[in-house]
Image (spheres, rainbow, N blue to C red):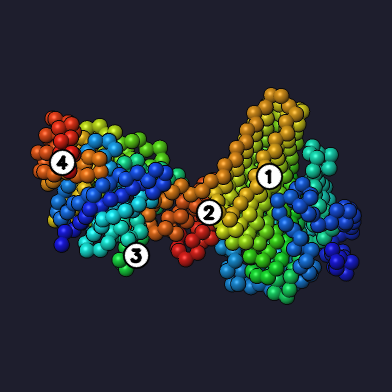
């Protein structure tokens, strides 16, 4: 946080004065702990010391033209209502937030109307907060760090009863063409009662060392439904540290796909708090890490009330010397009877040097519940590989097809066909750089 | 020059006790011929089929296999396939997440690429697949499903021959394709194989029982026992085996 004092006036200039409070609390809490080491339970499997060694500058401006954007983003204007940020700054030139349908609000924080600001004020900084919740290691230091840098951000609000079929894209692009860059994406998504939406939250990088430390707060109203795809496809030098915090009201449904293809190191947290009865939660993830990459996924579901179910399938593919971490926490509170929670974590290791640490963690305080978890770590089956090769498919391609099939099972469930296909071809390209899908 | 020439082939299991399975097999196969290889369980029939297709796990300790003049054993499995060798698996493998159609198209286009041919157009491919699926009486819904996943035993075997019909190999090796098939499925499989028979191709039928040979009539029958061919003859040898069992050849084994 070396240059924080110089940077603060810029943050103040783009945000309302009440943000001060969140920033100050964030600074204070972060400074008490600082960068984590391997002695910190939540970070014991990864090394973040490089973050202290690289001199990241606070975000600076960069220009990305629409044409240029196509080299990192397969998603155009036609695909979704898009709010875009470049190096943390709102980029109207690559956004499409005009002509939104009735009941859909998509604005940068500093352009919110007074009515919108009221909703922002109700939730911002309050969802990504584990204080008072179960768990002995509620380490939120990177949320605090993001809070400390609270400035610009995306606000998405769907009014009660409004169903938006067209996808909504929160796009964060980075381009560190003037030295290492730190930026702090912030999203607030509020779905009114009985509303419906599908959101793509993506982090796409051009080049250069970056630290993207994001926080997305999501509030889902009663009987509302959100499909949320988070795509991390940063460049090879990027550090991506994200937190997605969700609050679900009664009978709501939240489905997330946590998709990781890029970054030197990515650490994602998905924390879902079920504060209403009869909620459905589905947390799925697919991560592919190859040479030099580290991908850590931490999920947490708080079953605070009865009759909710949660399903979780995380798949990880690691090749070369890549490292993976999966930590899946499920807390079932004393009142949360009839909870049905199922967690599955499957890893495919493509090389002897690749490794994963998996840690399912179920803490159950109710007696009438169904909770299961399972973790598998395996390699490509030789017999399957031989079968494909015996039909003429060369070794590398046969391997890619089998790995693809393993990972794509998660993507297959994404309801939006265009999005699904684009992610599938990204996956294929990652596994088979020289081939067309 | 024979189409396929196996000379004095010795092979052992690569791991463990390194047991020798094939103890000097010699066999010549010409284009246009169908050879049946019969023998009791554990005689080395499937090992021979596996070695021809390039499966890992065996070590060829001596002998050669020449396919159209080239050293077959030096080729990777995918090159063998591209050069026209096809193995119908005894136990077809389930590949979740890869559809039959995608799999076949990838295979077909890989083979075409090997021969510097352009990819087959989607419409041409669809037509080919439809035609061959009909030949094998394969429900077209199976084409969109993951390879062999949830298929019945008979469907799996028919799927093997269907793949063969699409890929049109020069040398087809059927490894116990008849096991677990009822008579109707057996006839369908035989039809598929007979449709492939031509003056430009050869077929090796590996089987324990004579039954399949009623429908795929071989030109030659070889009996494999304890890793050696103990007797060769015409199609009537299969009938003799059916009648007398493998026991009557035990003397031949001593002589061989």
Same chain for mark 1 and mark 2? The answer is: yes
Dot 4, how many residues are within 10 Å of its Cα: few (below 14), some (14-19), or many (20+)?
Answer: few
Callout 1 touching callout 2 (CB < 8 Å): no
Q: Quadrant of residue A19?
A: bottom right
Q: Position of residue A234 (x, y in %)?
A: 64, 62
* Nearer to us in this view, B130 or A104: B130
Say whether residue A137 is left or right of residue A9.
left
Q: Residue furthest bottom?
A: A178
Q: Residue at x 74, y 58 (%)?
A: A48
> What chain is tagged by disc 1?
A
Residue designated by label 3: B113
Give whichever of discs 4 and 3 has the lower sequence position. 3
Which residue is disc 2 drawn over? A350
> x, y percentage for residue A233?
62, 60
Q: Which residue is mark 4?
A: B255
Q: CA distance from mark 4 to mark 1?
A: 66 Å
User: Disc 4 vs disc 1: which is toward the camera?
Assistant: 4
Which residue is found at the position 63% from the left and 59% from the top?
A293
């Amino acid at each position: 946080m070396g240059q924080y004092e110089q940077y603060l006036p810029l943050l103040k200039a783009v945000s309302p004065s009440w943000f001060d409070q969140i920033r100050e609390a964030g600074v204070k809490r972060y400074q008490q702990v600082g960068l984590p080491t391997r002695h910190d339970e939540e970070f014991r499997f990864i090394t973040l010391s490089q973050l202290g060694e690289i001199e990241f500058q606070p975000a600076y401006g960069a220009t990305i033209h629409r044409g240029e954007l196509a080299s990192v983003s397969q998603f155009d204007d036609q695909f979704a209502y898009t709010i875009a940020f470049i190096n943390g700054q709102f980029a109207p030139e690559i956004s499409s937030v005009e002509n939104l349908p009735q009941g859909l609000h998509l604005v940068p924080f500093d352009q919110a109307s007074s009515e919108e600001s009221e909703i922002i004020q109700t939730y911002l900084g309050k969802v990504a907060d584990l204080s008072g919740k179960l768990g002995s290691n509620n380490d939120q230091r990177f949320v605090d760090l993001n809070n400390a840098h609270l400035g610009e951000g995306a606000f998405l609000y769907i009014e009660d009863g409004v169903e938006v079929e067209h996808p909504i894209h929160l796009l964060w692009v980075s381009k560190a063409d003037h030295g290492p860059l730190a930026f702090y994406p912030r999203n607030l998504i509020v779905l009114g009662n009985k509303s419906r939406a599908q959101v793509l939250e993506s982090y796409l990088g051009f080049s250069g060392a970056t630290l993207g430390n994001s926080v997305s707060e999501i509030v889902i109203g009663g009987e509302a439904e959100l499909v949320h795809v988070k795509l991390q496809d940063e460049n090879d030098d990027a550090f991506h540290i994200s937190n997605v915090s969700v609050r679900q009201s009664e009978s709501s449904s939240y489905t997330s796909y946590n998709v990781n293809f890029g970054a030197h190191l990515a650490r994602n947290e998905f924390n879902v708090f079920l504060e209403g009865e009869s909620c459905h939660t589905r947390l799925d993830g697919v991560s592919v890490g190859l040479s030099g990459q580290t991908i850590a996924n931490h999920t947490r579901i708080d079953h605070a009330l009865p009759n909710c179910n949660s399903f979780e399938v995380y798949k990880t593919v690691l090749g070369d010397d890549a490292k993976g971490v999966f930590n899946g926490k499920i807390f079932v509170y004393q009142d949360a009877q009839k909870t049905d929670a199922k967690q599955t974590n499957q890893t495919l290791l493509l090389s002897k040097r690749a490794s994963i640490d998996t840690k399912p963690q179920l803490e159950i305080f109710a007696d009438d519940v169904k909770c299961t978890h399972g973790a598998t770590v395996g390699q490509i089956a030789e017999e399957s590989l031989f079968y494909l090769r015996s039909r003429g498919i060369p070794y590398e391609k046969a391997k890619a097809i089998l790995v693809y099939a393993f990972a794509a099972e998660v993507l297959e469930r994404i309801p939006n066909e265009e999005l699904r296909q684009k992610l599938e071809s990204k996956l294929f390209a990652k596994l088979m750089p020289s081939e067309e899908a | 020059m024979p189409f396929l020439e196996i000379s004095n082939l010795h092979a052992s299991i690569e791991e463990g006790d390194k047991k020798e399975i094939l103890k000097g097999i010699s066999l010549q196969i010409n284009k246009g011929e169908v050879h049946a290889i019969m023998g009791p369980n554990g005689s080395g029939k499937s090992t021979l089929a596996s070695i021809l297709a390039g499966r890992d796990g065996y070590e060829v300790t001596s002998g050669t296999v020449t396919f159209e003049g080239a050293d077959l054993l030096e080729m990777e499995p995918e090159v063998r396939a591209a050069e026209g060798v096809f193995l119908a698996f005894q136990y077809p493998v389930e590949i979740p997440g890869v559809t039959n159609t995608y799999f076949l198209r990838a295979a077909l286009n890989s083979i075409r690429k090997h021969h510097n041919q352009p990819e087959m157009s989607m419409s041409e491919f669809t037509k080919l697949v439809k035609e061959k699926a009909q030949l094998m009486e394969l429900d077209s819904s199976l084409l969109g499903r993951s390879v062999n996943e949830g298929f019945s035993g008979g469907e799996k075997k028919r799927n093997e021959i269907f793949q063969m019909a699409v890929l049109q190999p020069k040398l087809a090796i059927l490894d116990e394709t008849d096991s677990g098939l009822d008579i109707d499925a057996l006839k369908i499989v035989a039809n598929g194989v007979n449709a492939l028979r031509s003056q430009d191709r050869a077929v090796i039928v590996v089987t324990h029982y004579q039954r399949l040979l009623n429908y795929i009539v071989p030109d030659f029958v070889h009996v494999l026992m304890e890793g050696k061919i103990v007797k060769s003859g015409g199609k009537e040898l299969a009938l003799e085996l059916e009648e007398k069992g493998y026991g009557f050849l035990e003397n031949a084994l001593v002589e061989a």
